[in-house]
Amino acid sequence: MSRLMLVGATGLVGHCVLQQALADARVRQVVAPTRSALPPHPKLLNPLVDFDHLSDNADWWAVDAVVCTLGTTIKTAGSQAAFYRVDHGYPLQVARLALRQGAKAYALNSALGADPASRVFYSRTKGELEQDLQVLGYRSLTLVRPGLIGGERRQARPAEQLAVRLSTWLQPLLPRRYRVVPADCIAHHLLQAALAAVPGVQVLMSEQLL
């Protein structure tokens, strides 16, 4: 059985990954570092951390695989620099520390349009993270690129919620790539990728998640 690290467990997709992982017989333990405590569970180890000052020698870094669903918005973060720190800096630092302790697989919830050469700051940030992860040396790296994500967020994102509603109404007319992807579907693919640990780099586009 695998010891799985999940970062981003309090978010929409991360919460779905957590519930699926805790119910999965292949997972011996879920290590979910968060800023605030999660509800207890016999299979859950929940270190409380400051992502700006992560301990690099904690024994809980020793996991088999990592699922990363960390992410925010520029509005929530307060600036482009703060957004970049959360959406690029934190996931990359987690990847480095877990790899150093023996992790073999890393599955990232990225975004449709991720491209390090993009003129759009959000897409460029996601693309730079994908690019930087690929040079770390993980045996298995999976980049999941959903479009609009369906589900109820704890933190309101009005523009995104409006886009999801419009896309849901237009679903039959939209190409599969631009349809709303339920959060639990994204979580399923992230978890399966982390546990399967297929060698090499795999990219799952939004239409493949439905």
Image (cartoon, rainbow, N blue to C red):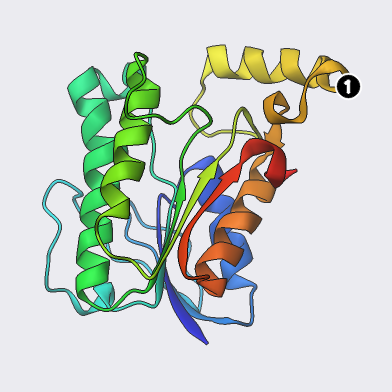
Answer whether residue 35 is visible to the viewer in this image: no
Q: Is residue 180 above or below residue 108?
A: above
Q: Nearer the viewer, residue 167 or 205?
A: 205
Q: Is residue 13 above or below residue 18?
A: above
Q: Nearer the viewer, residue 129 or 160?
A: 129
Q: Position of residue 134 (x, y in %)?
A: 32, 53
Count how many numbered circles sit on residues in the image: 1
Answer whether residue 47 is visible to the viewer in this image: yes
Answer with left or right where residue 81 lies relative to residue 160: left
Quarter of the figure with the C terminus = top right
The secondary structure type at the circle numbered 1 is helix
Q: Quadrant of residue 173?
A: top right
Q: Residue at point 12% right, 66% down?
A: 56
Q: Amino acid at mark 1?
A: Pro
Q: Residue at point 55% right, 12% down?
A: 159
Label 1 Cα crowd, 10 Å radius (few <14 / some 14-19 / many 20+): few
Q: Quadrant of residue 139?
A: bottom left
Q: Residue at point 33% right, 51% down?
A: 36
Q: Position of residue 106 (x, y in %)?
A: 40, 62
Q: Quadrant of residue 163?
A: top right
Q: Position of residue 78 (x, y in %)?
A: 25, 18
Q: Residue at point 37% right, 22% down?
A: 122
Q: Position of residue 1 (x, y in %)?
A: 52, 87
- In the current view of this chain or complex, which residue is farthest to the right? 172
Give the residue number, with chain letter if any, for mark 1: 172
